[in-house]
């Protein structure tokens, strides 16, 4: 499986380092575009014709505004809308085709080639601003190639502006007076309508002034509420007395009333006395007899008849159900029997009861009085609410009459003022600064060249970034590792003496490869390898150089190393090491393992053993897929500490994939500026099922 890099995510943020690296890499594009632009624009700047600008200033002031300051009582609200203080409109008017054509007609004898479009392009009109406040001054400029011509154009425009101003003053004054005359009948008619509505209101509701009527109703309502509050206070005192009498009676009021009526009934008192006598006799006989004795039974029946008669008499006197009354407070002599104390009130109790009745009667009278006052108060409140609505309508009608009357008076005053000031109106244009002879404003050679330099650098950088955007090559070792999602083992420097023995003697290459090999050993410490396939995505990425440098590093670390060239399509190992290729890997694979006593390796001056490809034919796959190939690697793994195999590139052929399946690991070589994003994506897909130990970036400049 592929070993992922610790920072596998591609950093797409363009930091300053990446920007400068891109500009340095594409410096030819920056220089070419910058040089080309300067070669084109510099002669144009040198041949640029001079330009001149003349200027003048006009004071544009609204006359009606000054009239208002002179006469604060006057109003400009009735002037025609064309006299509004609108300086934006004045700016547009000064650039209008009508006025420009008038100026062209004046200038035609001296400048017959002048037209409206050319004059509009040369003319500049702006309102002068001071301390962030727009003033009444207008700055007018004309730009051209002749200083005298620009001054003559401004003089013609000045005469046209002043003449047009006088024409518009007369037209606006006449229009303003006509407008006021048309508004006077309308104002009189509206005033008559408002007076008629106010008259109808007074006749309909029979009111001269609803505010006065409302004040009278408010006073009556105040007096009524005062009386009602006094009556409520009296009711509260009466209620306190009733509660005091009720507390003295220490009974329910209905029982008290019933007791009072029964106490005054002779028949009830007689029956009550007979009942009490029978109960005494029953109590005495109960001491002598049992409850089943005939005497006790007769007395009990007699007592029961008296009770029935007593209940009947009570119902007759009170004309109501009296069971609850006679059983009040549970004071009967026996459970379930009526109380004998009901109807036995004395004079004091009767007096308290009569007093309570008198207080209740007075309370009813005062309550009725209070209810009557409440209804009267409600009537007054409704009347006051109705008057409030009428006041709102009256307050709407009366101010409307006042406003219409004031409007008519203002119209009459404005009419009189405008009739007196026939010479005034609209805007007044006055020349503050006369047209000057044109002053040279260009060309500014230094500014033009500086702008061209800035534009050239900008376009050059844009071209560089554009070229880099369409370039799919990976330009740093970090980019290659990130796109392949493989750990970066090391980066080898770019050395020009390719294929020469001195190449491997270079200290910078040896140091870089030693560090890379050590990182490879440490990275695979958890899964040690014997055979390692060194390959690349495409041809020309330096995999053969890396394989030789790695074998040298392994030998310097004291390991017994075998370097095998398995690139049957384009073998390079024997050329790089200046070795013969008569006998090699192909020779060994064509024989049986038992037929070979020793491996056909070559060593000479190199500190490692070398097995070249040997003679090859047009079908390399038959060698790589031969069982003897796997047996060879197994036999070499017993003899050597490390077996490093140089193979064909990955893309386009199946040879390397077949060979990778026979090795313990795969080391990928990628050349900076040559490896592309497309190639890295394909390689990543092809190697996802193999043990990729890491990436060696080659060609760092």
Image: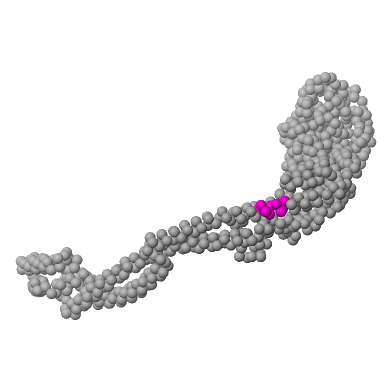
**In this view, 340 is above or below 590:** below
Choose between 107 and 120: the one closer to the eye.
107
Point out the image quarter for the C terminus. Answer: top right
Type of colouring:
one colour
Which residue is drawn at the image coordinates 19% and 72% (left, top)? 257
Image x and y of residue 609, in percent: 88, 31
**In this view, 612 is above or below 354:** above
Magenta-colored span: 164-172
- Please tell me whether residue 171 belongs to the stretch shown in magenta: yes
Image x and y of residue 27, in percent: 86, 41
* Residue at the outermost bottom position: 348
Q: Is residue 624 left or right of residue 576?
A: left
Choose between 668 and 162: the one closer to the eye.
162
Choose between 186 and 174: the one closer to the eye.
174
Image x and y of residue 680, in percent: 76, 34
Which residue is drawn at the image coordinates 57% and 61% (left, top)? 412
- Please tell me whether residue 93 belongs to the stretch shown in magenta: no
């Amino acid at each position: 499986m592929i070993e992922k890099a610790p920072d596998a995510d591609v950093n797409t943020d363009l930091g300053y380092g990446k920007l400068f690296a891109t500009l340095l890499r594409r410096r030819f594009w920056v220089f070419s575009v910058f040089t080309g632009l300067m070669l084109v624009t510099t002669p144009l700047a040198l041949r640029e014709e001079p330009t001149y600008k003349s200027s003048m200033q006009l004071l544009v002031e609204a006359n009606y505004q000054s009239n208002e300051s002179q006469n604060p009582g006057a109003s400009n609200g009735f002037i025609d809308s064309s006299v509004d203080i609108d300086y934006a409109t004045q700016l547009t008017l000064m650039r209008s085709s009508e006025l420009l054509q008038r100026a062209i007609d004046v200038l035609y004898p001296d400048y017959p080639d002048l037209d409206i479009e050319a004059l509009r392009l040369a003319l500049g009109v702006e309102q002068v601003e001071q301390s962030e406040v727009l003033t009444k001054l207008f700055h007018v400029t004309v730009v051209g190639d002749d200083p005298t011509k620009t001054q003559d154009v401004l003089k013609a425009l000045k005469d046209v502006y002043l003449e047009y101003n006088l024409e518009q003053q007369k037209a606006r004054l006449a229009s303003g007076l006509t407008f006021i005359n048309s508004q006077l009948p309308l104002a009189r008619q509206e005033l008559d309508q408002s007076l008629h509505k106010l008259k109808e209101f007074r006749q309909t509701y029979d009111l001269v002034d609803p505010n006065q009527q409302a004040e009278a109703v408010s006073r009556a309502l105040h007096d009524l509420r005062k009386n009602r509050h006094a009556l409520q206070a009296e009711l509260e005192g009466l209620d306190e007395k009733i509660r005091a009498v009720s507390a003295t009676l220490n009974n329910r009021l209905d029982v008290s009333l019933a007791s009072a009526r029964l106490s005054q009934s002779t028949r009830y008192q007689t029956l009550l006395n007979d009942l009490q006598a029978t109960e005494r006799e029953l109590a005495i006989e109960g001491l002598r007899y049992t409850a089943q004795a005939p005497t006790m039974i007769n007395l009990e029946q007699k007592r029961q008849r008296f009770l029935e008669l007593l209940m009947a008499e009570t119902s007759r006197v009170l004309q109501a159900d009296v069971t609850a009354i006679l059983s009040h407070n549970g004071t009967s002599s026996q459970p379930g029997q009526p109380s004998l104390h009901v109807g036995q009130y004395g004079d004091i109790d009767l007096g308290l009861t009569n007093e309570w009745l008198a207080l209740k009667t007075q309370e009813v009278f005062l309550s009725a009085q209070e209810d009557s006052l409440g209804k009267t108060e409600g009537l007054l409140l409704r009347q006051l609410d109705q008057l409030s609505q009428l006041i709102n309508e009256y307050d709407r009608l009366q101010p409307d009459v006042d406003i219409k009357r004031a409007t008519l008076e203002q119209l009459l005053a404005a009419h009189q003022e405008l009739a007196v000031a026939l010479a005034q109106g609209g805007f007044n244009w006055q020349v503050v600064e006369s047209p000057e002879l044109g002053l040279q404003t260009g060309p500014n050679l230094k500014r033009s060249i500086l702008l061209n330099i800035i534009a050239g650098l900008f376009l050059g950088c844009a071209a560089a970034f554009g070229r880099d955007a369409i370039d799919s090559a990976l330009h740093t070792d970090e980019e290659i590792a990130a796109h392949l999602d493989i750990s970066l083992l090391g980066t080898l420097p770019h050395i020009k003496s390719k294929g020469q023995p001195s190449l491997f003697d270079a200290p910078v290459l040896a140091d870089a490869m030693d560090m890379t090999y050590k990182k490879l050993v440490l990275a695979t410490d958890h899964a040690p390898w014997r055979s390692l396939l060194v390959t690349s995505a495409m041809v020309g990425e330096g995999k053969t150089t890396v394989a030789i440098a790695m074998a040298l590093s392994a030998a310097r670390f004291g390991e017994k190393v075998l370097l095998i060239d398995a690139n049957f399509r384009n073998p390079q190992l024997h050329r790089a090491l200046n070795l013969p290729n008569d006998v090699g890997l192909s020779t060994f694979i064509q024989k049986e393992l038992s037929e070979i006593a020793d491996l056909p390796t070559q060593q000479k001056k190199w500190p490692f053993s070398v097995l070249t490809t040997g003679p090859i034919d047009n079908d390399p796959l038959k060698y790589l897929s031969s069982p003897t190939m796997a047996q060879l690697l197994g036999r070499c793994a017993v003899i050597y500490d490390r077996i490093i195999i140089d193979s064909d590139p990955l893309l386009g052929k199946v040879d390397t994939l077949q060979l990778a399946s026979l090795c313990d690991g795969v080391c990928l070589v990628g050349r900076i500026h040559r490896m592309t994003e497309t190639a890295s994506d394909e390689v990543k897909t092809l190697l996802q099922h193999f043990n990729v130990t890491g990436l060696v970036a080659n060609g760092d400049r």
